[in-house]
């Protein structure tokens, strides 16, 4: 008897989730473009160049690229120093190592003085099957607590490309979650436009409003299609910027729906769900809200898609929570 | 300080240890075959050291993995798990039938280590965590008058993490002669060949107050002799700088581009296993 096993793919594997068109290394490609226009970009990594899509930039601008070795604290410190000389450093590593190991350096060397450092953080949430050491499940919450820092969780290749341009033009410290390798294209570059601090209504609805961030927006769109097929009118609000949080758009969107689902590739506590609840409370809008996100627990090792399914980070997971929110509404 | 009675170990049987290492290498090929990729280069490179540790130097009992007086082997590089699983399987802690589950959903034998798997002392994976915990264990054991010793593996890439040197400084400051660092210098890291100069490794550890040896980590007799010398060190910790060869024991993998993460095509495995069998 042979057993079919699903294996963890660990490092260096593409993250495209499904049959949507994919774009290769959108971050690296955009960074080259940004450098062509601005001329002041410096690329940095801490022994994760291959795995954070910055190698195209290194190949295009070898003199403007530095690999500091596996030393994340120093990565951020060096980036801060570079920024203080007037260059615009983009420093890549995994989200866990940027936030957990180099937290103090991000807070003080970068954020405290509004130093112009861009931290590009790979393996957000459950995009890796590599377990608690590599899954950045609480990174954006940690980063949102740091004053002055802009925090962004992109949905797809379109987002990543536009965000890379936008943050280069923004003068101040930024933390961005990275999707790497072959990244799906979900948002249409002809109609979508990323602005720091702004949420985007991707779909108008009436019954359920799905407020999502990061790659969960892809699932939110699929979930909205599935709900619409059941005659449930579902809207989608994509909120890539987690700080500064677009509380006004969230409140306005929520006010147009009977029930709310939030969806994030992150622990629920302290993440998007928490921010949405706060925004609704402040605006005086009462709606049943059901969250999709990672429970308050470290996640095991395994294939990334397996872990996503087990944690409910799928369109099915969103649909289930939409039904639950609507039941709350009726009860 | 009292020593556990079976110390020092009986004179090493080098041929038997080499046979153990070869079995372990075979276990690793069996494991990596499932996912078709993995940290097989690292695992094969450190097999000789782990065989010497688990089947000669370490005073431990596979029947009592939580004995408070056991010597502890800490694998700081969680991604070398394949080598640890091979050693633990060879010691009878896992049935060999479990090896093909390496890296599969719900397996205990993952591509990185969690301390929920029997025989694993610390969580690896976030690199630069091992030696500091080793210092803490060495201090704790000394406080409790235990003669148990700590062997902490770390990699050349980990020499770039500040935490490694913080621990190195503490280890010599506290005169931890029950602590041995096993530094696997295989010349590679995630981005390929070592990306930022770490040499001279031995001199750095010497400057930090450690007694240091530098050896060929794939020479079993040299490994055993170095461990013996480490046992005799008093008043300070001991570092063994191991020059190892990624892929050691499987010529095709030895010659393959020095990559952190090796992919092997499904039809290649049988030939690799034969190559290993053909080695002395
Ligand atoms: C703190 C930390 N930073 C980065 C990584 C990502 N990473 C995993 S293995 C690795 C290379 C480390 O060097 P080494 O252990 O010498 O590599 P190897 O010999 O296994 O190729 C890196 C950077 C990590 N696991 N932990």
Image (cartoon, coloured by chain):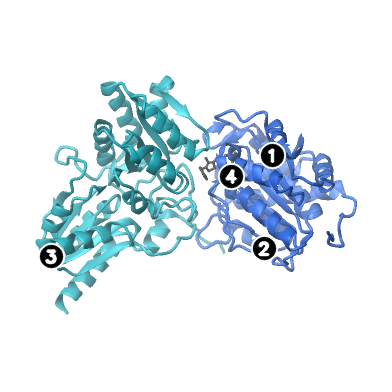
Q: Quadrant of the C terminus of chain B?
A: top right
Which of the chains bears the disc numbered 3?
A
Give the total number of marks visible in the rendering.
Answer: 4
* Neighbours of disc 1 within 10 Å: few (<14), some (14-19), many (20+): many
Count residues near mark 3 (Cα–Cα under 10 Å), then give few for <14, some for 14-19, many for 20+. few
Q: Are marks 4 and 1 in contact (CB under 8 Å)?
A: no
Query: Looking at the image, is mark 3 or mark 2 nearer the viewer?
Result: 3
The Cα–Cα distance between marks 1 and 3, rounded to whole angstroms, is 68 Å
The residue at label 4 has a CB less than 8 Å from ligand 1: yes
First in sequence: mark 4 vs mark 2? 4
Residue B70 in the image, given as x and y percentages of width and height:
75, 62
Q: Secondary structure at mark 4?
A: loop
For the residues marked 4 and 2, what is the alpha-carbon distance in whole angstroms? Answer: 20 Å
What residue is pinned by disc 4?
B39
- The local secondary structure at tag 2 comes to loop
Q: Which residue is mark 1?
A: B250
Locate the N terminus of chain B by quadrant: bottom right
The image shows residue A308, relative to residue B260, as above or below, that is: below
């Amino acid at each position: 008897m042979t057993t079919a096993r699903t294996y963890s793919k660990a490092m260096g594997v593409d993250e495209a989730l499904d049959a949507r068109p994919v774009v290769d290394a959108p971050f690296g490609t955009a960074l080259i473009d940004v450098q062509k226009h601005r001329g002041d970009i410096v690329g940095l990594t801490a022994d994760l160049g291959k795995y954070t899509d910055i190698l195209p930039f290194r190949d295009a601008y070898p003199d403007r690229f530095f690999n500091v070795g596996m030393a994340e604290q120093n990565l951020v410190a060096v980036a801060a120093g570079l920024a203080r000389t007037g260059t615009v450093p983009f420093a890549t590593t995994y989200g866990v190592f940027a936030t957990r190991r180099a937290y103090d350096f991000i807070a003080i060397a970068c954020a405290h003085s509004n130093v112009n450092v861009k931290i590009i953080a790979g393996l957000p949430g459950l995009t890796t099957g590599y377990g608690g050491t590599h899954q950045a499940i609480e990174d954006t919450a940690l980063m949102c607590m740091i004053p002055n820092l802009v925090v962004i969780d992109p949905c797809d290749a379109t987002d990543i490309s536009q965000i890379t341009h936008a943050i280069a033009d923004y003068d101040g410290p930024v933390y961005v979650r990275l999707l790497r390798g072959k990244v799906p294209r979900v948002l249409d570059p002809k109609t979508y436009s990323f602005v720091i601090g702004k949420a985007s209504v991707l779909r108008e609805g009436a019954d359920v409003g799905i407020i999502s961030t990061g790659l969960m927006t892809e699932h939110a769109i699929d979930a909205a299609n599935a709900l619409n097929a059941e005659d449930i009118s579902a809207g989608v609000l994509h909120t890539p910027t987690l700080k500064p949080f677009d509380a006004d758009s969230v409140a306005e969107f929520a006010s147009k729906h009977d029930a709310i689902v939030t969806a994030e590739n992150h622990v629920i506590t302290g993440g998007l769900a928490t921010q949405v609840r706060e925004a609704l409370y402040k605006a005086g809008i009462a709606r049943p809200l059901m969250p999709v996100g990672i429970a308050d627990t470290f996640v095991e090792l395994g294939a990334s898609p397996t872990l996503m399914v087990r944690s409910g980070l799928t369109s099915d997971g969103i649909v289930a929570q939409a039904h639950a929110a609507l039941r709350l509404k009726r009860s | 300080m009292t020593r556990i009675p079976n110390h020092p170990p009986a004179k090493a049987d080098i041929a038997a240890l080499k046979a153990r290492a070869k079995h372990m290498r075979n276990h690793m090929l069996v494991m990596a075959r499932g996912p078709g990729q993995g940290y097989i280069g690292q695992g094969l490179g450190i097999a000789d050291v782990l065989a010497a540790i688990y089947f000669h130097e370490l005073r431990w009992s596979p029947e009592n993995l939580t004995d408070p007086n056991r010597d502890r082997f800490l694998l700081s590089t969680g991604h070398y798990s394949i080598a640890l699983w091979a050693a633990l399987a060879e010691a009878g802690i896992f049935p060999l039938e479990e090896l093909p589950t390496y890296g599969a959903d719900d397996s205990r034998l993952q591509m990185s280590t969690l301390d929920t798997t029997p025989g694993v002392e610390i969580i690896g994976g976030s690199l630069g965590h091992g030696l500091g915990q080793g210092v803490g264990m060495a201090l704790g054991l000394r406080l409790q008058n235990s003669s148990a010793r700590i062997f902490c593996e770390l990699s050349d890439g980990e020499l770039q993490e500040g935490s490694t040197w913080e621990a190195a400084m503490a280890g010599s400051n506290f005169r931890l002669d029950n602590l041995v660092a096993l530094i696997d210098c295989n010349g590679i890291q995630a981005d390929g060949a070592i990306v930022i100069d770490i040499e001279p490794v031995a001199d750095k550890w010497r400057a930090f107050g450690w007694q240091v040896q530098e050896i060929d980590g794939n020479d079993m007799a040299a490994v055993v002799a170095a461990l013996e010398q480490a046992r005799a060190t008093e008043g300070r910790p001991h570092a063994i700088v191991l020059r190892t060869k990624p892929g050691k024991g499987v010529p095709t993998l030895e010659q393959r581009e020095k990559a952190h993460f090796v992919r092997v095509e499904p039809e290649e495995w049988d030939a690799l296993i034969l190559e290993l069998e053909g080695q002395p």
